[in-house]
């Protein structure tokens, strides 16, 4: 299974009632996140260390070299 960027959450489409409602899971894997969004997350002052590591790992996997100043 692919590595997730955000948690999965179930979305219920409105307009139905009872068993006529339609639900689907919404999620974002690392492949769906743009390079710019990953770089912006790395530059945030309150980014979580685990998510920073995920973003850095994904950028190196895509072949992006970062220059730290």
Image: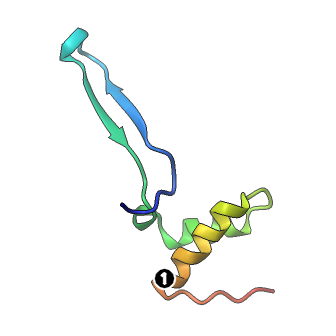
Q: How many marks?
A: 1
> Where residue 2 sits: x, y (%)?
39, 62
Quadrant of the image containing the C terminus: bottom right
> Can you say whether 53 is above or below 15 in the image?
below
> Where residue 46 sits: x, y (%)?
78, 56
Q: Is 52 displayed left or right of 13 in the figure? A: right
Q: Residue furthest front?
A: 1
Report helix, strand or loop for mark 1.
helix
To which quarter of the image does residue 22 belong? Answer: top left
Q: Is 14 displayed left or right of 2 in the figure? A: left
Q: Residue furthest left?
A: 20
Q: Which residue is mark 1?
A: 61
Q: Residues within 10 Å of mark 1 (few under 14, many from 20)?
A: few
> Can you say whether 1 is above or below 8 in the image?
below
> Can you say whether 38 is above or below 27 in the image?
below
Residue drawn where x is 55% and y is 71% of the image: 36
To which quarter of the image does residue 10 belong? Answer: top left
> Where residue 41 sits: x, y (%)?
65, 64
């Amino acid at each position: 299974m692919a590595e997730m960027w955000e948690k999965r959450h179930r979305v219920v489409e409105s307009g139905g009632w009872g068993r006529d409602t339609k639900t689907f899971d919404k999620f974002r894997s690392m492949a769906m996140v743009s390079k710019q969004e990953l770089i912006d997350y790395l530059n945030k002052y309150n980014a979580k260390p685990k998510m920073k590591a995920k973003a850095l790992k994904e950028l190196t996997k895509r072949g992006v070299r970062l220059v730290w100043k």
